[in-house]
Amino acid sequence: MPIEIPKDKWPGSIKAITIGATAAEGGTRTRTVTVGGQTTMPYLQYEAPTPHKSIIAIEIKSRKPEDWSALLAETWGAAMTDPAQWAQKAEEAGADLIVLTLTVEDSVEDAVRAVKSVLAATGLPIAVWGPGQAEKDNELLVPVSEATKGEKILLGICEDKNYRTIVATAMANGHLVQSRAPMDVNLSKQLNILISDMGMPKDRIIMDPTTGALGYGIEYGYSVMERLRLAALQGDVMTQFPMLVTPGFEAWKTKEAKVGEGVPEAWGDWKNRSINWETLTAIALVESGADIIVLRHPETVKRIKEAIEELMVAA
Amino acid sequence: MALSGIQIYKMLPQTNCKECGFPTCLAFAMKLAAKQVELGSCPYVSEASKKQLAESAAPPIRLITLKANGTEVKVGNEVVMFRHEKTFYNKPGLFLRVKASDPDLAKKVAQADAYKVNYVGMDFTLDGFAIEADGDLPAAVKAVRAVTKRPLMLIGSDATLLDSSLSLLAGESTLIYAADSSNYEALADTAKKHKAALVVKADSLDALADLTQKVQAKGVEDMVLDLGGKNLGEWLTRSTQALKLALKANFKPLGYPTIFFAAQNGLDKEAVYAAQAISKYAGFVVLDTFAPEMIYPLLVLRENIYTDPQKPIQVQPGIYEINSPKPDSPVLVTTNFSITYFSVATEVERTGLPAWLLVTDAEGMSVLTAWAAGKFDAERIAKAIKSFNVADKVSKKRIVLPGHVAVLSGEVEEELAGWEIRVGPREAVDLPAFMKQVLN
């Protein structure tokens, strides 16, 4: 006897949001990327098809990071000293989006030059993040935003203590913003409200609920994302944004990924362990609702892309 | 699925005889729904109602226990689709598949059996072994049982061979893989005879539900489902559907834990497949590779997903040594909320600089939350310094407070005469720079 499969019919849905603009749309990108649009919990294709799959972003920096794992330095090689070259290698590695992180050492000229060189080197859409210190972020992101008007760049990071300047410049120059709150449903929602209240259109906000790496608090991020997605599907407008997560950043700062010597034998081979750490952090977040997955190692990119393709196959 | 008070009321005599000790049948029904009384208190309830109420009290996903001589693994008994709704209870059993034909069988099992890894003070291991009957199964069972005390799973379709192998495992609860529509009668008999649990396998949920009912009719209650998902998408769909049917529709024929073979599409996908199965409701996950660099992260993922979200894990308050501190190394202060502790400890470890990390008892709250709740103040910090004898360990009496509680520095100074109080960064991520630039 055929079983009747219970299906959830949700009143709400996630907004479909496009990053990047082609020449016809006022930018210079040869490709744009759209995320979101779901009407179900992650990849439950039997309830409704997933309109846009999760995408992979690769994180690069405006200058060579000295504190990255030797395994990453080995993989990216000399390209790490040149953001344009690095962006090209990231594109070859399968990125759908390039995340360029600026550093505190950058002057305004350095930052603008780095962003423009990346835009020239790849046709992919890009995200640009400040170094993570409020004053410096604003100092660098405003001129970057003005110099790239119309490109629909994802600008970050907006946090509760520093979002106004970034949102204002993104609004004025046709970019998007990334709204980051520290692993809390209500704080995420609150920041989205503050950003919307400034007049930012709702199709230009990506939310970053923050996460921990595997073993370092991933379960908090995992459940916050599930709760945000459920709230969105239940109709809570201020949670209906696609979610970006940074498993690459989180996983590669863990000891398991960073350290190859003097660790327990039960941790196994360093390189494979590191990649597994990033991969497992990422796949768990894909299962809990991540739309944009920012990674660092090309092997992880390959594995997560394959996993997403499999999830897109309707059973 | 639990019945509501009103649903239970409809099954009671509705005579308000008061013999149960409650003024009305409805009041009694409400107490029953809240599981505060036993149905036996009602002398007049019909047999039919009794049966129905007993069924509704059964867990929606049957608890399956595999036992060997001394160790056991329990799976099932889950009640929610999402961990935040309550918690996931029984961690999926991680089994390593080995082949009866493998000349190195005993060695491989012994090596994997000895595997143990520590995470946050807990030791994790594999849960058992699955022996594939591609050679002399009874001989393999003997060889494996000689080197491990963990529960076993036997993979084969020959009932006679399984029967003789299970005879070697008397007193244990073993899992048999797997019964399908062609062999279920023989395998169900074998399972029943040896009190083994039986995996039931079919290509669709419809066929599977049909088969579990047939197996149950043969007298086997302990079943595990092979949902047959052939890729990540199929597994997610079927696993979600089966659990939802059991939890939300009280559909008994699929109310069993599931089993998933992580290497079915190749070893390069094994880690990702296993990770999805762990996150998405599998009862047993079978691995083909014994690789610590994969098993360690999988064990950690399993622990993280199955941690009760209502009880944040705490670390033991105390003085922790990072990078072999010396008497002149700095003392960094933080709270015993697990994420806080791990964020701080990781950042300090990363610097390579020696430090003492003083973890205060803030009842498992983060720095800001604990401060706001009055669980992380000058008094508690001073108490921790004294009770963990920090003064005996250091020559340089200097402590670093988290930047978020800079306001406490005056009070801490008063509490701790002779100590230098420094204020560190607000976020753990800024500790390396602070330690290199400010503390040196």
Image (cartoon, coloured by chain):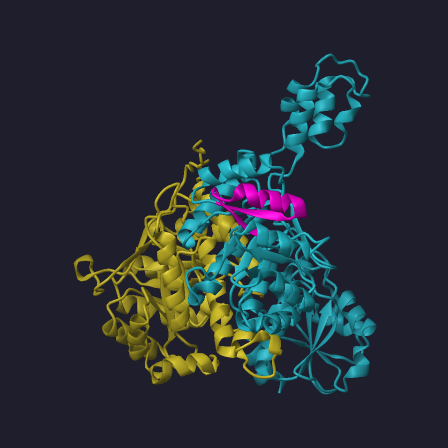
Chain colours: A yellow, B cyan
Image side of residue A201 versus residue A191, left or right: left
For residue A136, above or below residue B5: below
Image side of residue A62 versus residue A161, left or right: left
Could you say which is closer to the camera, residue B313 or residue B28? B28
Extreme residue toward the left, this view: A24
> Looking at the rendering, which quadrant does residue A94 occupy?
bottom left
Q: Quadrant of the N terminus of chain A?
A: top left
Q: Position of residue B345 (x, y in %)?
A: 63, 73
Image side of residue B381 versus residue A247, left or right: right
> Looking at the rendering, which quadrant does residue B116 occupy?
bottom right
Q: Position of residue B406 (x, y in %)?
A: 65, 69
Q: Residue at x 63, y 58 (%)?
A: B152
Could you say which is closer to the camera, residue B263 or residue B352? B263
Give yes or no for residue B193 being in the magenta stretch.
yes
Q: Position of residue B249 (x, y in %)?
A: 53, 33
Could you say which is closer to the camera, residue B411 or residue B206? B206
